[in-house]
Amino acid sequence: MKIINFILVTFIIIGSITAQQSSIRGNIYDDETGEEIIYANVILDEGKATANSDLQGFFTFNNLEPGVHTIKISYIGYLTYEKTFDLKAGKSIYEKILLKTEGVKLQSIDISAKKQQRTTETQISKIQISQKQLKALPAIGGEADIVQYLQVMPGIISTGDQGGQIYIRGGSPVQNKITLDGLTIINPFHFIGSFSVFETEAIQNVDVLTGGFNAEYGGRISAIVNIKTKDGNKKEVKGKVSANPFLAKALIEGPLIKMKENNPFNASFLITAKKSLIDKTAPVLYPWVNENDSLNMPFQFQDLYGKLSLDLGGGSKINAFGFNFTDKYLNPSVSDISWSNTGGGLDFRIVPGASNLIVDALFGYSS
């Protein structure tokens, strides 16, 4: 009830301080999947102003003069988008933009949107990791994982197996804050230290801040690792199943209400599951590990994550998500240890129609 009251009060405050200012804003999506395109380059009136789309594909130009304005959007691998608007005084124009892919043939050239981002943001000791980068690293069992990527980064040391932790620039593990969609994950790594609770296929972006981070990350003094998941496919239902001697996993995603260019509202879902197999496969594949012990590998883990995304139009959006991560160490002759991370949350973005104000909020529980 308190959450509902807070949201209502927030809308009232927004309405009371909204100023009638002209603006052009929008969200940029992949035309095939509906996935947000982050850090796309947006140019207003042939260079009078520039912007980059954020993690939700959102961009905005505020305090514009009435009249004719043109925006041009470009991103590697997509056709350039250009459109002209006739902006009225005190009005705001919102555009849902679906970029179409195109084939690009390049020589040995490294092109990145990060340079454009650095022109507008201060990046102190911050490293950004995309899903593509995670998959490019050779992985144990053929399954890419964020913990394996972190281990090869400079200034980061891992303790390896048996609930492996990471030490970033000399700080202890408890001085690191690791979050999933804004919620703190207390035990982000499994007993088998080469795997984390985070599903690579569901990751949209990872920010590693090893210094100079804001007060919003209070409670930690060493480093911050922010993991942001993507939305489910907004155009069609898709799935993926894979297995190796260490684990099996599955992902399913798709639309509840399909994204359409002329419809501001859409909804999608994303569900992932991961379960260890090492306790089952070890007796067959690695019989020499415990030749004199019938216990074999006593390690087990299971990860579940689900997300529901609602686009309300005009840039406003609501995400609801939940997770359950469990680890077990079953060895009667030594100990019976288990732990679990359970939680869920609701985050939303409110973009008033004719205001420079954007409200982001998160309500969640993590145990």
Image (cartoon, rainbow, N blue to C red):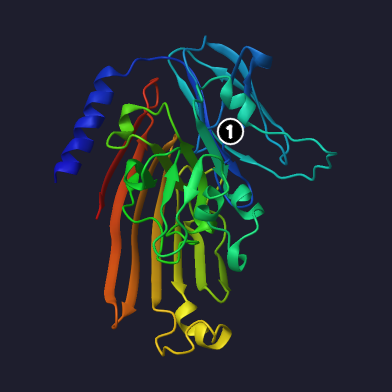
Horizontal side of 140 relative to 110 (left or right) equals left
Residue 119 or residue 336, whichever sits in front = 336
Q: Residue at x 33, y 41 (%)?
A: 175
The residue under label 1 is 39
User: As drawn, which residue projects farthest toward the front?
Assistant: 292
Q: Residue 200 at x, y = what percent?
A: 53, 57
Residue 239 or residue 88, whichever sits in front = 239
Q: Judge whether 250 appears above or below 187 on screen.
A: below
Query: What amino acid is found at the position of numbered circle 1 in the picture?
Result: Tyr
User: Where, quadrant-wise, is the C terminus in this rendering?
Assistant: bottom left
* Quadrant of the rendered image containing residue 220: top left
Q: Residue 78 at x, y = what percent?
A: 71, 40
Horizontal side of 154 relative to 338 (left or right) equals right
The answer, for residue 261, to whether it is visible in the render is no
Q: Residue at x 29, y 64 (%)?
A: 340
Determine the secondary structure under disc 1. Answer: loop
* Quadrant of the rendered image containing residue 337: bottom left
User: As drawn, which residue projects farthest toward the left?
Assistant: 1
Q: Residue 320 at x, y = what percent?
A: 34, 52
The answer, for residue 288, to whether it is visible in the render is yes
Q: Judge whether 190 appears above or below 328 on screen.
A: above
Q: Judge whether 96 appears above or below 270 on screen.
A: above
Residue 334 or residue 248, whichever sits in front = 334
